[in-house]
Amino acid sequence: MEYFSTRLRQLRKDRNLKQDQVARLIGVNKSAVSAYENDLRRPSYSVLIKLSNLYGVSTDYLLGRVNSKSVDVSGLSERDIKIICELIAEMANIL
């Protein structure tokens, strides 16, 4: 899962976050984040989703299945899309 570790590290660096900050935000310890980024350990599904939410990318992007960082909102209502955009904006303000 080389894509995962490489992409995870790059996303963290792009946001100027340290491993301990990421760990705190997703509810794991720093050594777990380090292990994910060094391809020594794989996250649980729930942690994978938290990482996806934290960085605003799809789990498919993290896993290397797609190269697009965007989230497909086709099929969602305008209200749902607005909520997602507000959530992303709020998360960006937190970071």
Image: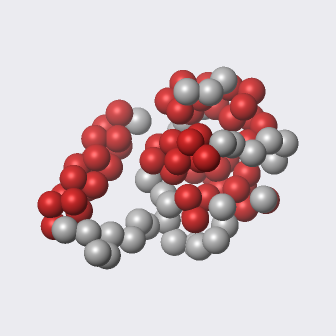
Eyeballing the image, is 33 above or below 66? Answer: above
Q: Where's residue 76, x and y in %?
A: 26, 69
Residue 73 showing in the rendered view? yes
Q: Residue at x 21, y 60 (%)?
A: 80
Quarter the C terminus occupies: top left
Q: Is residue 39 left or right of residue 16?
A: right
Q: Residue at x 61, y 58 (%)?
A: 62
Q: Quadrant of the N terminus?
A: bottom right
Q: Residue at x 47, y 43 (%)?
A: 54
Judging depth in this view, the residue of 9 and 63 nearest the camera is 63
Q: Position of residue 12 (x, y in %)?
A: 58, 44
Tally the marks: 0
Q: Residue at x 49, y 65 (%)?
A: 69
Across and down, in percent, residue 64 comes to 66, 67
Q: x and y percent of residue 86 in the render?
A: 23, 49
Residue placed most toward the observer, 78 or 93: 78
Residue 13 visible (yes or no): no
Q: Does 33 sit left or right of 91 as displayed?
A: right
Q: Is residue 42 above or below residue 80?
A: above
Which residue appears farthest toward the right when viewing the image? 40
Determine the image quadrant of residue 19.
top right
